[in-house]
Image (cartoon, coloured by chain):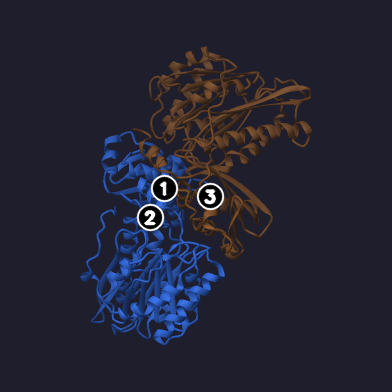
Chain colours: A blue, B brown
Amino acid sequence: MPVNLSAPDPKTLHPVPGVKLGITMAGVRKANRRDLSVITLAEGSQVAGVFTSNRFCAAPVQLCRKHLASGTGPRAIVINTGNANAGTGEDGLVRAFSTCVALARHLELAPEQVLPFSTGVIMEPLPNDRIEAGLPAALADLKEDNWGVAAEAIMTTDTLPKAASRQLRIGGKTVTVTGISKGAGMIRPNMATMLSFVATDAVIAPALMQSLVREAADLSFNRITIDGDTSTNDSFVVVATGQAGHAPITSVDSAEGAALREALVSVAQQLAQAIVRDGEGATKFITVQVDAGGSEAECQQVAYAIAHSPLVKTAFFASDPNLGRILAAVGYAGIADLDQTKIDLFLDDVHVAKQGGRNPSYREEDGQRVMKQSEIDVRVVLNRGTASATVWTCDLSYDYVKINADYRS
Amino acid sequence: MPVNLSAPDPKTLHPVPGVKLGITMAGVRKANRRDLSVITLAEGSQVAGVFTSNRFCAAPVQLCRKHLASGTGPRAIVINTGNANAGTGEDGLVRAFSTCVALARHLELAPEQVLPFSTGVIMEPLPNDRIEAGLPAALADLKEDNWGVAAEAIMTTDTLPKAASRQLRIGGKTVTVTGISKGAGMIRPNMATMLSFVATDAVIAPALMQSLVREAADLSFNRITIDGDTSTNDSFVVVATGQAGHAPITSVDSAEGAALREALVSVAQQLAQAIVRDGEGATKFITVQVDAGGSEAECQQVAYAIAHSPLVKTAFFASDPNLGRILAAVGYAGIADLDQTKIDLFLDDVHVAKQGGRNPSYREEDGQRVMKQSEIDVRVVLNRGTASATVWTCDLSYDYVKINADYRS
């Protein structure tokens, strides 16, 4: 039951010159389900990515890092759902590389020019034979206006495909930024989200690419959480084909650079928030903002303590203004010298707690009114500095338990 | 639905000479419910406690620390359920102290000789007038064999009272250790559990008292978690009345000291594990053991990452051997230099993962068999050192969500 989210209209997803997508059914885990996607990138495309910080990172993530570092220039991406190829040891690396070799042979590339991605169940052998058998069908389907189908094909427990697209003008040229993402569970990105691919035809200087992608991730996927479980497969990859033909963007300080940065960040944020809106069992979309902290890091710490508290999340599910639970989470967030008598708590416009205690003018019915909304802003004011941080999350419902108790059955 | 836990037989709870308990209904939150307990301690009793690390610690916790530090020698304990008196600011401190003053007047003590405890809803004003009005009835009920009734009176969402009692011989004298605890939700003790009171008539040297209590807490209440929410009211208090009349115990290195330590730790562990067995919505009791780590701290870090993962906990609820989720939790536990190719995972006697990958000889039906049990041992071997740590937790079920979505209604 996604929160204020609907399937993207394919017509609104602008193709990105130089990027083609092909999708097929390879029967990775279930039959008659689109589970294999191939994305080809025009020669000269630049690719940068950020990946999970999970030490049990999946075989494809390990290969992606290696292939990006090889400097051979990525020309193709292969994505399967149904199997994460994580917790699969040496054998997982062999199977992931085998799919790269197979796709490279079809496209006359070096295996290092292929970036593999997997999402699905952990610790089960990747059926790479079925994936490799499906490649010809995926390649036969390659076209530029296939973003909507690809968004569906990378879904696992997602209930809706997630895609976003923006266009802007740079140096008299129209520049497109289009991306897709998937999430639903095991979502507490740390350096990236479950899976997200964004492409643009903008011309971006190689030196700027990685920092731009890192910043976009930090302002989007690194600000969401559903269940606090950092996935083994988190990957956020941005492709810049450079086919728009404007003068190269070398810095985000220029007007053009700032405009491109804004477009990239807004697409990334839209994709990241879509993951939360479609979080497993989500019935509410919660924005947790922590202000007046001593540092952005401590504000994030407090925001995540609130966003991860099962007691806070179940109270949102119940629309129960049991807001002391939020104060408790602030208290155990790990700020050793936190002075509770300085804390203020707001629920949207309602001033709930003042100087660490119940605000004398707070009325239960006001809190109740806000808790019934499907979108809620929680604001904590630490009154100990000038830093701020915002995190997006959802509530914890029966369905989260149901979905994760049933996931494999 | 507690896991292999039953209400203690009052006859098995040995009275502790010098400790009397009185219970009544004060209507703190609901009528016709025992919600007020008074415990009196014989003159000369020693008291030591450990309290929550939550920076939003409740007013009674702040007063307890102050009164224990006053050196006046605690002679009485007053406990109310239904209201935690946390997140109540200055007004909460005034109300908590007022109950101390009232009880002190009845017992002809200084207010600092009274230790107040509260548990229940956060951020609501403590009805101290009703508590103070109930004191005479509680005092009229004072008796040594009232432990079972007190265990019931401190329950909130607990479904069963929790008590444990042991006797041992020291210096030819019979020594008793008897205690009670309550928990159920907001359980991730950090320095102590929600509420636990243990008394002994052993004669313990003042210098040994605090370290003994700290060690008992570290080996029991600081090893459990239900939902990762560290309460604002966690308190673990141990009373030693010294009435057994044996020679004072000055160290745990002596045979008597070791025996007393063992009895105290085992009572504390039984009370702590009872809280997990009666965890909100719990259907399984899980022991997470992490071995061969570089330090006890990193073993605990890994054990808690597993014990807090909603995905791991829902898989246990579903009896689904979706064990890759455990590897994922190990991976994001925060050990930067963790080498996944060294990790082994065992479920009871079943060797699930070997060198970071699925153990070739692992069969799904073996994992399934263990997952169906009501008591499950998870063992992770890091193969990077000699340290170990054990944490006890429970699964995450529909009922956890239900209980916490309904708690106040």
In front here: B376 or B13? B376
Q: Which residue is drawn at 49% across and 67% down?
A: A125
Q: Which residue is drawn at 57% across and 15% down?
A: B143
Is the residue marked by circle 1 packed among few (<14), some (14-19), or many (20+) residues within 10 Å? many
- The secondary element bearing badge 1 is classed as helix
Amino acid type indicated by mark 1: Ile
Label drawn at residue A306: 1
The image position of residue A84, as x and y in percent, is 45, 65
**Residue A397 at x, y = what percent?**
36, 46
Q: In the rendering, at what x and y percent does residue B325 appear?
A: 49, 56
Circle 1 chain = A
Is residue A276 visible in the rendered structure shown here?
A: yes
Q: In this image, A351 relative to A333: left or right?
A: left
Q: Residue A104: which quarter of the image?
A: bottom left
The kind of residue on which mark 3 rests is Arg
Q: How far apart are labels 2 and 1 at the CA level?
A: 10 Å
- Tell which subunit mark 2 falls on: A
- In the image, which disc is placed on residue B369? 3
Q: In the image, which is nearer the foreground, mark 3 or mark 1? A: 3
Task: Give the residue drawn at x 57%, y 53%.
Answer: B302
Residue A293 is situated, as x and y percent measured from the top left of the image, at: 43, 51
Compared with A273, A374 (above or below) is: above
Q: Residue B296 carries which label?
A: none
Looking at marks 2 and 1 on the same chain, the residue that comes earlier in the sequence is marked by 1
Check residue A391 in the rendering and tell me which mark sits there, or answer none: 2
